[in-house]
Amino acid sequence: MKRQAIVIGLGQFGMAVAEALSRRSVEVLAIDSSSTLVANAASIATEAMCLDATDERSLAKALPARRDVSVCAIGEEHRDASIMCTALLRQLGSPRVVARANNDMHARILTMVGAHQVVNPERDFGVRLSNQLLYEDIKGELRLGEGVLITEAVAPPVFIGHTLARLQLPSRFGVTVVAVKRRSDGSVELPGPNTTVEQGDVLVMVSKDSAVADMLDRC
């Protein structure tokens, strides 16, 4: 059975989430109070509905309890609506609610009314961009959860020719290498202790916030 998701709020962020889920074969119900945005989403979502997500009876028509996840992507200009929508999704039995926040206070309120996960896409992007501006070797970052990142970075020169066991990255820096992209042939390798880092390799690492940046500073 295909997974099902609701995405509420079809601004730039919500549309991006809806499109990305659809590309991964998730059945997406896209919702907004704007008929224009709903019409735009109709081509990428399984279904699109125009309704007021702050009205309990209207939102109940989306059957959130039957979906795997509900995303409240309502933007900053409608903060009160995002809080009300998040609370209603929980009351209507959604098994997982992910809500978009615009600042720390907003995030705390969304958590208090029942959001299982709160994201701040603008802040997260700013952090990722700042790291890439400061460290040219960082190619990309993906947040796994609160304070946990997956980072792709070119191996520092001091790593070249050494095995991961010898480098001792988990104990020295709190960084774990989970994959190695080889420059030589473009292959991706799941590394072991005896994997040797080669010139130009891209390391895919899991760590806490700033651990990879701190490692690059020290290397």
Image: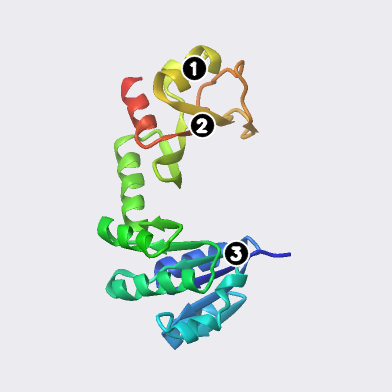
Image coords of residue 215 (percent x, y): 37, 25
Q: Earlier in the sequence, mark 3 or mark 2?
A: 3
The crowding category of the residue bearing disc 2, from other C-alpha atoms within 10 Å (few below 14, some 14 to 19, many at least 20), is many
The crowding category of the residue bearing disc 1, from other C-alpha atoms within 10 Å (few below 14, some 14 to 19, many at least 20), is some
Q: Is residue 94 above or below residue 211?
A: below
Q: Quadrant of the N terminus?
A: bottom right
Residue pointed to by mark 1: 160
Depth order, front residue of 198/54: 54
Cβ atoms under marks 1 and 2 closer than 8 Å: no
Q: Quadrant of the C terminus?
A: top left
Q: Amino acid at mark 1?
A: Ile
Disc 2 is placed on an element classified as: strand
Q: Is residue 89 left or right of residue 181?
A: left
Q: Earlier in the sequence, mark 3 or mark 1?
A: 3
Please identify, in this view, whether the residue under mark 3 or under mark 2 is nearer the observer. Answer: 3
Disc 1 is placed on an element classified as: loop
Disc 3 is placed on an element classified as: loop
Splitting the image into 4 quarters, where does residue 178 fall?
A: top right
Residue 46 has which mark? none
Q: Amino acid at mark 2?
A: Val
Q: Earlier in the sequence, mark 1 or mark 2?
A: 1
Please identify, in this view, whether the residue under mark 3 or under mark 1 is nearer the observer. Answer: 3
Residue pointed to by mark 2: 202
Residue pointed to by mark 3: 68
Splitting the image into 4 quarters, where does residue 103 fall?
A: bottom left
Splitting the image into 4 quarters, where does residue 36 fall?
A: bottom left
